[in-house]
Image (cartoon, rainbow, N blue to C red):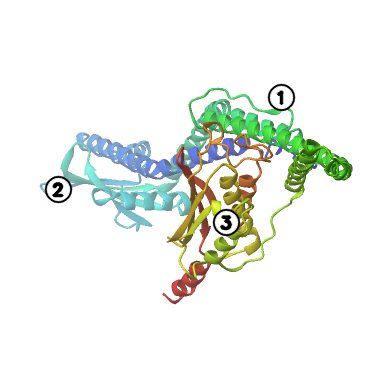
Amino acid sequence: MSRIRLPSAVKSLSARLLVLTIFFVMLAEVLTYVPSIARFRMTELQDRLQAAHLAVMAAQDSERLSPKAEAGMLREAQVYAVELHRPDGTVRSLGTSAHVTPAQTYDLRRAGLVDMVGNAFDTLFTGGDRRLRVIGPVPGRDDAVLTVDLDEGPLRAAMIDYSERILALSLVISIFTATLVYIALTLLMVRPMRRLTDSMMRFREDPENPDSVITASGRDDEIGTAEAELASMQERLTNALRQKERMAALGVAVTKINHDLKNILATARLVSDRMGESEDPEVARMAPRLVKTIDRAVNLCVQTLTYAREGPVQLDLDTVDLNALVSEVAAGLPVAAPDQVRVDNELPEGFTATADREQLYRVFANIAQNAVEAGATHLRVHGGRKARRTLVCISDNGPGLPPTIQDTVFQPFQTAGKTGSSGLGLAIARDLVRAHGGEITVVSTSGEGTEFRIDLPDRAAAAQAVPRAAAG
């Protein structure tokens, strides 16, 4: 049996969880970065407008500025030229811009979010050495307008610096968040999942060892439910494997016993023949009973051996007339006087099913024989079709199933205490019905009798439905 290898640390669930957390946090940061960089650029331009407004107002308060002082004020405001348009139509300017054509003109009064985002990325990817003209309201006054010419280089440099700081902060937040999520999910999910996986692998290596069964932690979430279900499944499989071993050992033992019993039976028959010739009437009367008892014991061993040796059921499917099959079963019931048992075959004439005739005969025969051996004198068989299923019900007037075996009646070696019964009839019947894709159930049982229902797939109806569905 090949051993399953655990995934490497890089391919583990924890590593993937860490990478995904970082990725999604970074994705969230990118989505917030887009409007953020647009707002940063807008704020930078508004700051330039405010600085330019202060410069032009300072120049207005001075009676006369030297060219050197004017250049210093423009340099301080980081602009080339400023024009202040007042509501009365007067214009106050600082620097000269009329003879220079800017590369781009932006009117902040009409800038929407889409325009702001587009202009921001235009500055980042294609700007740097262009001259821009920015038009906007005077800070604090909507009736006056400022027109400013400025260099795009410092603006782009500030935006790149802002982007780098945002990127660094996003990485720190992503790693910090991912670490917290990683630790939390490792404790809450990954470790419990590893515990489940380890238990499965240990159970796979040694399924018959009780120590390989996981112990549920008692959690009240999905992990706890998975642990409890896994523990239950492992316990059932362990018990099933133990029973399988016992069945295998039983099969070997019965094979040996069967061989010995054949020799014993041969000897017993010789003795019974001699006893039958005895002049003592009591001895002659007991001899057949002795042989019958030994025959019953051998038959019990043979049935057990046959059940233990049987492999998967091989079906030879054909159209079976269930009415005729039930009549054949009724005629072959092994009773001392056939007229003592009445079988009412109420199946319609021509009521058919697609099945293996011989195997289905065994199903009906086992159910009927069990009922007769339990003391039933009247059997009723009826059925019909429902939702592409073939249903056959078999009821009797026997004493019913004992409460001790009602839940396990279809398990091997479950008997109602009848002498000579192997307890395999209904178990074999269930296996054969399930091999046909059906199910057998106990509909009701009481002191007045028991009713079984056989549910088989109506293969003919299903086959006819496929062409109709294709045509539709």
Earlier in the chain: of badge 3 and badge 1, it is 1
Whether residue 215 is visible to the viewer of this picture, yes or no, is: yes
* 40, above or below 99, in the image: above
- Residue type (three-letter) at the residue carrying disc 3: Gly
Residue 58 rendering spot, x and y as whole percentages: 24, 34
Give the quarter of the image for residue 315: bottom right
Residue 249 rendering spot, x and y as whole percentages: 80, 37
Under tag 2, what secondary structure? loop
Q: How many marks?
A: 3
Give the residue number, with chain letter if any, for mark 3. Answer: 437
Under tag 3, what secondary structure? loop
Front residue (pair 272, 169): 272
1 vs 2, front mark = 1
Q: Residues within 10 Å of mark 2 (few under 14, many from 20)?
A: few
Give the quarter of the image for residue 373: top right
Residue 122 rendering spot, x and y as whole percentages: 42, 53
Give the residue number, with chain letter if any, for mark 2. Answer: 90
Earlier in the chain: of badge 1 and badge 2, it is 2
**For the C terminus, which image quadrant?**
bottom left
Tell which residue pokes out farthest to the bottom in this image: 471
- Image position of 52 (left or right of 363): left
- Do the CB atoms of the residues marked 3 and 1 lie less than 8 Å apart? no
**Disc 1/disc 2 C-alpha distance (Å):** 96 Å
Q: Residue at x 61, y 30 (%)?
A: 231
Q: Which mark is residue 211?
A: 1
- Residue type (three-letter) at the residue carrying disc 2: Thr
